[in-house]
């Protein structure tokens, strides 16, 4: 280790030896200092930002050129020939939309404003320093027009991984890239009453926010460019490449426990009935004014490698968050957000091999230990009174490991051809541990904690991409083509025996039900006049809260995918650009697809662009949707039922007439305008998405006559066709008045999804995909969402005020009645003060006025067991925080 440290020191010293230090100030034309201006050494990743007085200090090579860039101002290049440089930047008329983007086009000259498709570029540093959101999903929820994410409760694994989506589509219909490379998905498949029910998705929260430079969101169908999962769009996360700068923050926050609403006396988690988290989940403790306390510590640092602009940038993040507990019904006393402890590491590096060849690599590791309450067992055959007097609330805990590594070589030939060969590996592992539980068939002899097994998903992707830009063909032609080979592997692994087994009266696993029987309790509803009524009820096996995966559930399946693509963009004139893409894909398990896309942008005036696209798309069924299987207990206000979720390839599935899963097929179209007038910019885009053969999770079919040991069964099916119309809106204004700067951004989304057809065949439609399942699908996004974000800064002080309005959402409860959530406006406030150039304090509140969703009735029929379901605005109330940011 000492030798490695010495080597790094010597390399860094050699790099510094050939450098000089340059300092100065950057101001606007009126002489006011400009904080936050990017100062970079041309041709390298070496850069710094100006402090609150506009000052900067940077070490550069002899003969270097400095680039000064700032949103809303003209970029200036200046030779670093002297040690002192004073720069004055002038405002321009469109810089806010002139960021070059990676996603949506393989043309390296394409920017947001001249793109043929709608793209959001989100500067994560700005968002994280002006918001109390501590996870990527929640950050995007409030700044991207059609992005939606939900905190879940009582949904098993989904309590620990938030499902998120674009334009109301499924979580697995949005493709996620890291630095332009495909990101692996989570192994978790969403069940029960979550948004994204029946879908897998990508765990964005596994990527530390401090490692991210910006997030590009392509709000358009892109399967013809990027392949499966890009039906609703693409999220590309671009990671940090800064050097010689240590940045980070320490954040602490808490939630207000004063839930709004009139609750019946004795309601769990109201005054005097606060669940005791140190008890068995069924006893009460001290009242609390605040809960959900969270601590987040993050740091990012980069250092140069060699003398040709190489770098390595490293991020570390620690997050600890306690549970929130909110008013609930007796069958779900632990309703609220999960507890979590997580460690995130990420690194990004590039090493030039020659003037036009570069080796690059990036990757990270995320570990999370989570803890969430399941549904309460108050009495009956699942409660052993001598162990848990009065009942208990089991806890579903999980250990999530998410690891990834990508590496490649980029080079450019003498003729201008660009080549990129890369390999990206990722794996997500989800391990369940059930605590505060019991295997009731073991009675007093049962352990109170079980390893319940879990699942994992592995993905390895090899890419070879080629592109070239011809600047002398009309207004410019960019062509690109390439190939991709991907391997995916899905695994379910079993837990310990007690987590899935039913034991007999002698404590032996039941293997022969004709000679062995489980312990019993008296049946309180026994009717001696009813021949079908039994005087006793057998105690169930398995761990309560979440039954473990058994050897019969174990799966180890893989598949391969090979694809070829080509795309081209031609600037016919300065005003008119057209582009097209074609992609062929072949999957080893279901066959081939061919998809295409056409897009165009017309410059109507110097300030207004018209753009549009039309494309076909697809999404391959995930391995989890094909092979996932589980026996579980479904709880609601009426009691508990045993359910089998059968794999798609099983005889049980075929016996119900359900066929092999095929790919989803989509047609996308969009038409929009971009405008830029000095301090004001705008984008307005309408869209249409038609999806056929969407994969959904059915309702519960009667399986009591099949001798499966369960009363109901459900399946994954190509079950519905949907069509979605919508509109995305982004309006932005930024203006400086003397020493003060004001900003206002309005983002909005209007989304209307319709179910065109239910493909139930001969099965009962109400069971196959009934009113309740339809509501889950249609509630993936509110009908509309609008957010007004206001900012102000002057010298050392800055402030932000945000208003977000979520429209009405309608869900269907267990009683088959509508649960209506009326429109709500959530207000966020943040105040910041820069004490020194290195330290900044920020205080604020998310949901300042402690607004809650519409309280539901007293019947206890909500999906999650609380007085609210998981809707987009959340159900934990006001959050107050303080953050100390540092920059050295």
Image (cartoon, helix red, strand yellow):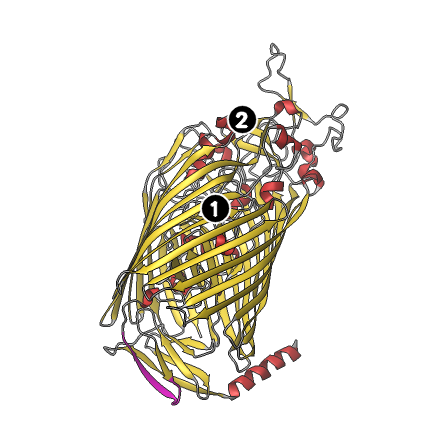
Q: Position of residue 623 (x, y in %)?
A: 60, 45
Q: Is residue 81 magenta?
A: yes
Q: Position of residue 465 (x, y in %)?
A: 54, 64
Q: Locate residue 216 relative to residue 25 in the image: left or right.
A: right
Specify the label residue 264 is tagged with: none
User: Mark 2 and mark 1: span between their CA atoms?
Assistant: 37 Å
Q: Can residue 135 be seen in the rendering of this structure?
A: no
**Which residue is outermost to the top?**
529
**Residue identifier under label 2:** 763
Q: Can residue 89 be seen in the rendering of this structure?
A: yes
Quadrant of image for the C terminus: bottom left
Q: Secondary structure at mark 2?
A: loop
Q: Secondary structure at mark 1?
A: loop
Quadrant of image for the N terminus: bottom right
**Residue identifier under label 1:** 337
Closest to the observer, 252 or 865: 865
Query: Mark 2: few, some, or many residues within 10 Å (few <14, many ≥20)?
Result: some
Task: Tell me the mark number nearer the camera, choosing from 2 and 1.
Answer: 2
Q: Locate residue 221 relative to residue 441 in the image: left or right.
A: left
Please state the extent of the stretch shown in magenta in the rendering.
79-90
Closest to the observer, 650 or 141: 650
Specify the quadrant of the image occupied by residue 806: top left
Specify the quadrant of the image occupied by residue 451: top right
Q: Position of residue 831 (x, y in %)?
A: 33, 62
Q: Position of residue 2 (x, y in %)?
A: 65, 78
Residue visible at 43% across and 85% down in the picture: 64
Specify the quadrant of the image occupied by residue 473: bottom left
């Amino acid at each position: 280790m000492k030798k490695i440290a010495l080597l790094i020191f010597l390399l860094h010293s050699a790099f510094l030896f050939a450098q000089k230090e340059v300092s100065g100030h950057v101001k606007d034309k009126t002489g006011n200092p400009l904080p936050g201006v990017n100062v970079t050494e041309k041709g390298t990743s070496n850069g710094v930002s100006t402090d609150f007085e506009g000052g900067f200090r940077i070490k550069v090579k002899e003969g270097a050129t400095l680039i000064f860039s700032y949103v809303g101002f003209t970029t200036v290049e200046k030779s670093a020939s002297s040690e002192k440089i004073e720069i004055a930047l002038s405002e321009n008329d469109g810089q806010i939309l002139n960021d070059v983007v990676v996603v949506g086009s393989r043309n390296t000259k394409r920017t947001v404003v001249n793109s043929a498709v709608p793209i959001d570029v989100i500067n994560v540093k700005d968002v994280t320093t002006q918001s109390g959101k501590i996870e990527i999903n929640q950050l995007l929820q409030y700044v991207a027009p059609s992005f939606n994410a939900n905190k879940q409760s009582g949904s098993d694994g989904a309590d620990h991984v938030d499902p998120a989506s674009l334009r109301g589509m499924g979580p697995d219909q949005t493709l996620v890239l890291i630095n332009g490379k495909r990101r692996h998905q989570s192994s978790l498949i969403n069940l029960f009453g979550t948004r994204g029910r029946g879908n897998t998705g990508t765990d964005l929260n596994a990527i530390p926010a401090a490692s991210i430079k910006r997030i590009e969101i392509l709000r358009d169908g892109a399967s013809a460019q990027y392949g499966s999962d890009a039906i609703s769009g693409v999220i590309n996360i671009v990671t940090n490449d800064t050097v010689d700068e240590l940045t980070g923050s320490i954040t602490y926050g808490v939630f207000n426990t004063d839930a709004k609403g009139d609750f019946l006396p004795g309601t769990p988690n109201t005054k005097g009935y606060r669940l005791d988290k140190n008890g068995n989940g069924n006893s009460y403790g001290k009242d609390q004014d605040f809960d959900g306390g969270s601590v987040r510590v993050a740091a990012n640092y980069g250092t140069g490698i060699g003398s040709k602009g190489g770098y390595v940038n490293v991020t570390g993040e620690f997050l600890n968050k306690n549970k929130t507990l909110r008013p609930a019904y007796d069958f779900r006393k632990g309703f609220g957000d999960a507890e979590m402890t997580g460690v995130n590491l990420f690194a990004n590096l590039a090493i030039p091999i020659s003037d036009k060849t570069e080796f690059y690599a990036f990757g990270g590791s995320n570990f999370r230990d989570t803890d969430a309450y399941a549904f309460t067992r108050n009495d009956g055959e699942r409660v052993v009174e001598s162990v848990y007097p009065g009942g208990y609330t089991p806890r579903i805990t999980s250990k999530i490991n998410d690891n990834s590594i990508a590496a490649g070589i980029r080079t450019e030939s003498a003729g201008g051809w660009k080549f990129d060969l890369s390999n990206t590996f990722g794996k997500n592992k989800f391990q369940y541990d059930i605590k505060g539980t019991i295997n009731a068939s073991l009675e007093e002899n049962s352990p109170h904690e079980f390893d319940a097994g879990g699942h994992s998903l592995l993905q390895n992707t090899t890419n070879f991409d080629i592109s070239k830009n011809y600047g002398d063909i009309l207004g410019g032609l960019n062509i690109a083509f390439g190939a991709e080979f991907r391997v995916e592997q899905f695994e379910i692994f079993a837990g310990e025996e007690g987590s899935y087994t039913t034991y007999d009266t002698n404590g032996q696993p039941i293997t022969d039900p004709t000679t062995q029987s489980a312990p019993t309790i008296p049946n309180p509803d026994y009717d001696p006049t009813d021949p079908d009524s039994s005087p006793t009820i057998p105690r169930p096996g398995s761990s309560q809260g979440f039954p473990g995966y058994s050897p019969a559930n174990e799966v180890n399946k893989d598949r391969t995918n090979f694809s070829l693509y080509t795309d081209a963009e031609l600037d016919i004139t300065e005003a008119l650009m057209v582009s097209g893409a074609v992609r062929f894909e072949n999957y080893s398990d279901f066959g081939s697809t061919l998809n295409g896309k056409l897009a165009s942008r017309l410059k109507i005036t110097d300030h207004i662009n018209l753009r549009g696209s039309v494309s076909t798309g697809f999404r391959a069924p995930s391995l989890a949707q094909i092979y996932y299987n589980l026996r579980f207990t479904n709880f609601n206000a009426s009691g508990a039922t045993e359910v089998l979720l059968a794999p798609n390839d099983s005889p049980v599935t075929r016996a119900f007439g359900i066929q092999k899963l095929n790919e989803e097929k989509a047609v996308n179209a969009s038409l929009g305008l971009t405008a830029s007038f000095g301090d004001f910019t705008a984008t307005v885009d309408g869209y249409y998405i038609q999806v056929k053969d969407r994969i959904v999770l059915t309702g519960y079919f009667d399986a009591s006559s099949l001798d499966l040991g369960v009363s109901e069964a459900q399946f994954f099916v190509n079950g519905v066709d949907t069509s979605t119309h919508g509109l995305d809106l982004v309006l932005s204004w930024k203006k400086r008045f003397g020493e003060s700067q004001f900003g206002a951004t309005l983002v909005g989304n209007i989304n209307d999804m319709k179910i065109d057809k239910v493909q139930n065949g001969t099965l009962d439609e109400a069971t196959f995909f009934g009113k309740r399942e339809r509501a889950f699908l249609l509630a993936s996004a509110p009908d509309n969402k609008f957010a007004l974000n206001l900012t102000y800064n002057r010298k050392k002080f800055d402030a932000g005020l945000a208003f977000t309005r979520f429209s009405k959402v309608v869900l269907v409860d267990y009683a088959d009645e509508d649960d209506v959530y009326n429109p709500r406006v959530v207000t966020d406030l943040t105040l910041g003060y820069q004490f020194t150039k290195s330290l900044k304090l920020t205080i604020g509140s998310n949901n300042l006025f402690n607004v809650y969703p519409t309280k539901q009735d007293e019947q206890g029929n909500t999906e999650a067991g609380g007085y609210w379901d998981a809707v987009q605005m959340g159900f934990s109330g006001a959050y107050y925080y303080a953050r100390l940011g540092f920059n050295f």
